[in-house]
Amino acid sequence: MKALVLEEKLRLSLREIELPREMGTRDVLIRVARVGICGSDVHYYKHGRIGPFEVKQPMVLGHEAAGIITAVGSEVRDLKPGDRVCMEPGIPDLASRASREGHYNLDAAVRFWATPPVHGCLTGEVVHPAAFTFKLPAHLSLAEGAMVEPFAVGMHAAGKAGVKPGATIVVIGAGPIGVMTALAALAAGAGQVLVSDLFSEKLAIAAQYRGLTPVNIRSESLAARVIEVTAGWGADVIFEASGSPKALEGIFDLLAPAGTLVLVGMPPEPVRLDVVAAQTKEARIETIFRYANVYPRAVALLASGKVDLKPLISAVFPFEQSISAFERAAEGRPADIKLQIALEESAA
Amino acid sequence: MKALVLEEKLRLSLREIELPREMGTRDVLIRVARVGICGSDVHYYKHGRIGPFEVKQPMVLGHEAAGIITAVGSEVRDLKPGDRVCMEPGIPDLASRASREGHYNLDAAVRFWATPPVHGCLTGEVVHPAAFTFKLPAHLSLAEGAMVEPFAVGMHAAGKAGVKPGATIVVIGAGPIGVMTALAALAAGAGQVLVSDLFSEKLAIAAQYRGLTPVNIRSESLAARVIEVTAGWGADVIFEASGSPKALEGIFDLLAPAGTLVLVGMPPEPVRLDVVAAQTKEARIETIFRYANVYPRAVALLASGKVDLKPLISAVFPFEQSISAFERAAEGRPADIKLQIALEESAA
Amino acid sequence: MKALVLEEKLRLSLREIELPREMGTRDVLIRVARVGICGSDVHYYKHGRIGPFEVKQPMVLGHEAAGIITAVGSEVRDLKPGDRVCMEPGIPDLASRASREGHYNLDAAVRFWATPPVHGCLTGEVVHPAAFTFKLPAHLSLAEGAMVEPFAVGMHAAGKAGVKPGATIVVIGAGPIGVMTALAALAAGAGQVLVSDLFSEKLAIAAQYRGLTPVNIRSESLAARVIEVTAGWGADVIFEASGSPKALEGIFDLLAPAGTLVLVGMPPEPVRLDVVAAQTKEARIETIFRYANVYPRAVALLASGKVDLKPLISAVFPFEQSISAFERAAEGRPADIKLQIALEESAA
Amino acid sequence: MKALVLEEKLRLSLREIELPREMGTRDVLIRVARVGICGSDVHYYKHGRIGPFEVKQPMVLGHEAAGIITAVGSEVRDLKPGDRVCMEPGIPDLASRASREGHYNLDAAVRFWATPPVHGCLTGEVVHPAAFTFKLPAHLSLAEGAMVEPFAVGMHAAGKAGVKPGATIVVIGAGPIGVMTALAALAAGAGQVLVSDLFSEKLAIAAQYRGLTPVNIRSESLAARVIEVTAGWGADVIFEASGSPKALEGIFDLLAPAGTLVLVGMPPEPVRLDVVAAQTKEARIETIFRYANVYPRAVALLASGKVDLKPLISAVFPFEQSISAFERAAEGRPADIKLQIALEESAA
């Protein structure tokens, strides 16, 4: 099977590779059609590791995928060949305590695509459990299907926050996860969402959406803006999606009493937290790790037309140009929200 | 002061009446501009009572109001003469235990407009606490301002339900509260909302809104439709907004496992509840009583443009024709979602 | 394998029966030591069915069990032969949507001991998934281990209620589930728990526990007592554990504003619910179906000494006298809270 | 009126001072009987300020109080002269948005005893709103009544945590707030509570309570102990009650997946928070600011006998020796959990 293989740090090949293909009775076989490039894929490409996860042997990249079912196991009931689907890339041990409690994303034994030593999905076909494979409605494209994975992160963040209808929300960071979190918060009921960043290119993309208000913190104070739009009360929820240690400085000044801060971004080092400032607001701080039980509702939201992720697909590369796609992703152009790879032209 | 007075059951006068006008340091004086007619107003008109609340002496009607501030008490900071505002019609004892716990709507000593023996607001001017008076943004009309009160009921119901983004919702009953609850649920994140009723006129109004799907239960089974759109899983939340005792029959067949039923409608008699059916789904049943702490976010949602209530205003009557307005409201025409009375033409 | 077999309604045999014994890599083999008799066992014995579940062929009874591990599958890590354990009697499909969401008790495909056509555990040995088998600390007896199952129902009810520390609680019904719910609520923080019943024998058993106050509703008004002990505020949580349709009459008079009613008992027919009375208190009504994710904390509570269930074991019968045990259980003596069957004398 | 006056940093007088005494219709007059010395009182004594709150003019100290009502305003219904009571020391603006939402502790305009420029209660008599004055049951002493205030902090922390029955809890810091938080968590359902500290004297006091397990982090690893007692799963809730910046180092290693960290202690500077470690556990972090709506249930818990705070009263000083009491408190003896001042001998 041909696949995009990270041989080692900074060395990609598009080549044949032997991949496990045993299919259980509750699995499906999927012809991969579209794969989005995630920041973590790029990070493995550039650095060969993320924290404790190190690329020690060649690994197929990619985990944001949609495709078409080509075969199903004997016990699969709700899916059939020809169905267009998107896939959750993590396969937990469903019998673990974390999984039984509904937090399968926290199961320590989870096998997640393109997280060493588990291969990703930038290849022609993958075997996947039916339980983590979700049918796309007829009018959702495979391109949108491949956006469900990063959108699920935003959905999970919005779900943790418990956004109340009409709430005022701040999202710090207008990268792909920031914008998708902002869109999830908007869909979850936000009356208005301020999205802050340093790059006007990123903010311009967020600003296309009605309900998202860009704030360029190079030219204006986010705190002042929040105080103004909330008449001094503060934001009901703040999503930190930049991962910048500086983002937490004075953050509780922006927060409403009894408000919630959701830490979505992953700062490389421990950050400074002003505990007393948080206490004065009696802030609740939520953290998220990927997502769980979000896909069906994420697909429903896209299908409803309430959320349109197509404007976030900045460019699409054919599978044969996967390496170029990664090179461009590695450039980190501010206006590139999401790059995708199309494995079969007709499928998109 | 001229007012619309319910002298006794079935007898209305538009006449001068002496009303209390002492203004405290934290009160505001408001020139009333628009008042919506609520089902409870009509019920007092037709029956002279609602449960234990009996009209024993002449009472001014009306509690869904917007107006313009004409004077403010010495301690009022956030409002000033000329501000266009809407008002929460219930004034609780803020020192009561229920109020201190954040449930001021459950305070037994609450004084609520047009609930005997408390006068309503269908009169030229009212004194009201600043804490329960909310400024309307410039682009919201006073007509929309007078819709905030019934919309707050829907917002409160949606808040209790904890609608998750992308959820599938059912609203039983397409009257004013049903439609406003459906719109609140949609704003709160619903992916799709099925609204059921027996009257096609009512459903036609709901159907104007993208995201609301009408289901006429004269011609099709709501249960079958829910099972179809949710692939057998059931609705995440059901709002019962008809008050019909029949609405609860078999209702848990429509509900998803661990789903929520919110009882918004007020059936005149106890209803039959299938406890074992509820337990099999481990259903949570929420009830609501008016609303609390909802106005700021309701105004924000209307201001954001995410919710447009103007299509629900079926007709507007000048103050001088208030009695005609009530007579029409008493007819209960299916297509009349909300009738309003305009106290000053220029204000609307 | 010898087992207590319900051949058909009203006919029990203690006889050899062929039982499935294939053991998977994640299963354990358990020598059954103690089994409690549940109301549902007795109901199958007397009526041959519970709702849609009908005994159509001989079925082994029993699902409240503790025992000793005799063998473990190759992938089992946390258990070993010799471990004393208790078992959750329901085995769900862990890949179902309900299970993935943390509600494995609501999975429609669950296989639950002694629920037709699934055999129970009143037999010498059973195979069970390690994931639903829980080790007992050294100082907990197997007799107590067999009490974990019914106690888990009370724990689940208390968990749903969200009992706040110092809360005033009412439990209606002093049967086994009522008392165990009362003890769970007490352990969950209740300041005081009123337990009501018609039978003084049952109440006398509840009254042994400090913190449980018996109220015999033959001789005094529960409502009056609640109003007295709460200075008019009402109970924070009411657990309905009698299953009596009359229990819901006027029940919201006892409830505090924003209080919670948990429906634990299973009335045979739909009951009358006063919706408006519930709304006036803005009551939340929770229902429960068995339990999920409760065993580890239930065992921890028993191990801590905070909850002592031994006084609720009314009598213990040797396995050979199982039929006599069921005959006595079928008598329904008020003072019999829990009857147990000891499969091996030395194990208890 | 004689009072204990902090004239300025490090200078106390027991002298006559003019205090406001206007009594409103909903106020009560209370003869102060017992006052506990809080760390904040000592901090004002030693440093003359806490953060932005600076002692600029003489201020009466003390805010943990119980007393006896000597007069009531004309609208007070639930209290009468002779009632033994404890008092919430903060008087919020009940009409503020924070108060209306149930978070009156977060109202910026709150007037809190012994927080500059508001006088405290170490004086003969105080006027207080009835709404923040709570009757003590007959068998609770005034000494215990004066413990309700610090215990309320622990109750509020336990409430925020949402301790599930049978949970394993860690409390870092065995000072007065740490121990009271541990006792609140135990009462709220904890199966076991590990309390850690550096001082064996403090731990010895905690160890008197069944259910509290002391861990001296000078001699053993808290992390290792938590891993051991939870079989590797981690603590369900950790309360940080030391205020030490070092306490957060590696703290998420101790936490169960989806567990909760409650920040009770107030570190003088921002602390380092390992965001990625928190995310891996999907930790929720709660902060608290004093308490709200806790007193009635705190009094109920003490009255129930489930929580006994008397062992925490290390010494009692007569009013005339108040200055000595503060000098001793300022020593910070490890075994001094709570020092109290008795204003009238017969009252205690």
Image (cartoon, coloured by chain):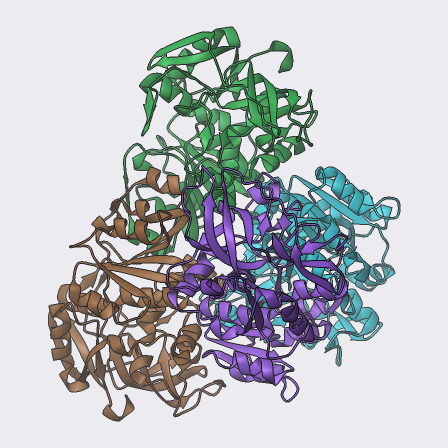
Chain colours: A cyan, B green, C brown, D purple
Left or right: A264 as drawn, with respect to A334:
left
Examine the rendering and report whether any part of residue A23 can be seen: no
Residue D258 pos. (x, y %): 57, 67
Where is residue B173, by image quadrant? top left
Where is residue D40, by image quadrant? bottom right
Q: Relative to D251, is B36 above or below?
A: above
Left or right: D32 as drawn, with respect to C308:
right
Left or right: A293 as drawn, with respect to C334:
right
Q: Relative to D210, is D139 above or below?
A: above
Count of numbered circles in the view? 0
Residue D19 pos. (x, y %): 63, 47
Left or right: A41 as drawn, with respect to D198:
right
Q: Relative to B176, is A161 above or below?
A: below
Residue C165 pos. (x, y %): 45, 62
Closer-to-camera residue (C90/D59)? D59
Residue B175 pos. (x, y %): 43, 27
- Please tell me which residue is depicted at 14% across the width and 83% down the height of the picture: C321
Examine the rendering and report whether any part of residue A257 can be seen: yes
Where is residue D98, by image quadrant? top right
> Quick one: quadrant of the N terminus of chain A?
bottom right
- Please tell me which residue is depicted at 29% across the width and 71% down the height of the picture: C209
- Please tell me which residue is depicted at 43% across the width and 9% down the height of the picture: B323
Closer-to-camera residue (B147/C324)? B147
